[in-house]
């Protein structure tokens, strides 16, 4: 699953992942994502940090607080690359942090790493 308020990022990630044979569900914000997570049970979730209404930190915390999805890997996506942002992501339960713009290899590498676990 890819959660990002940027249609460009959602489309780019979806295209890259689909080319590798992955099924991708997208959501434009945290609220839409929570409903889709319940319907689709994604194996891995990419979530943008800066989103309206429910930001990535809040969405990640809610996902990880649900026992049904606590073990689902959540990878934060952000244009920020600061130590504080990475630490805050870890605090809410994220499994990895990718800086935008990400490369194809970074995106696919993160998927392969976390789906192997």
Image: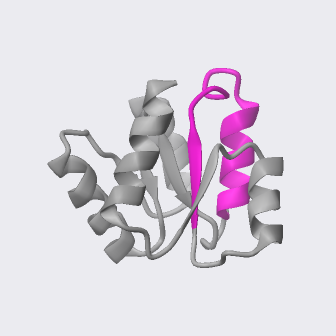
Task: Please state the horizontal and vertical placement of residue 112, each as a whole percent of the image.
Answer: 39, 37
Of residues 81 and 13, which is closer to you in this image?
81
Residue range in magenta is: 55-77
For residue 34, above or below residue 69:
below
Coloring basis for residues: one colour
Q: Quadrant of residue 65?
A: top right
Left or right, 50 with reference to 108: right
> Which residue is drawn at the image coordinates 24% and 57% (left, top)?
16
For residue 80, above or below residue 39:
below
Q: Quick check: is 2 in the magenta stretch? A: no
> Which residue is drawn at the image coordinates 52% and 24% (left, top)?
117
Task: Please state the horizontal and vertical placement of residue 50, each as a whole percent of the image.
Answer: 63, 73
> Which residue is drawn at the image coordinates 70% and 22% (left, top)?
67
For residue 91, above or below residue 4:
above
Q: Quick check: is 76 in the magenta stretch? A: yes
Task: Please state the horizontal and vertical placement of residue 26, each as a whole percent of the image.
Answer: 37, 53
Task: Please state the horizontal and vertical placement of residue 57, each as a whole percent of the image.
Answer: 72, 58
Residue 43 visible in the displayed image: no
Residue 23 visible in the displayed image: yes
Left or right, 44 with reference to 85: left
Of residues 101 and 12, which is closer to you in this image?
101
Task: Tell me how many marks there are.
Answer: 0
> Which residue is drawn at the image coordinates 57% and 31% (left, top)?
72
Of residues 94 and 1, which is closer to you in this image?
94
Q: Quadrant of residue 85?
A: bottom right
Left or right, 77 with reference to 24: right
For residue 6, above or below residue 37:
below
């Amino acid at each position: 699953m890819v959660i990002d308020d940027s249609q460009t990022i959602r489309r780019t990630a979806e295209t890259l992942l689909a080319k590798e044979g992955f099924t991708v569900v997208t959501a434009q914000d945290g609220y839409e994502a929570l409903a889709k997570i319940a319907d689709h049970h994604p194996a891995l979730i990419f979530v943008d940090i800066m989103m309206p209404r429910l930001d990535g930190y809040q969405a990640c915390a809610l996902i990880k607080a649900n026992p049904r999805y606590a073990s689902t890997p959540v990878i934060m996506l952000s244009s920020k690359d600061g130590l504080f942002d990475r630490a805050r992501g870890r605090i809410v339960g994220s499994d990895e942090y990718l800086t935008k713009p990400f490369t194809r290899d970074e995106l696919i590498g993160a998927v392969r790493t976390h789906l192997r676990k």
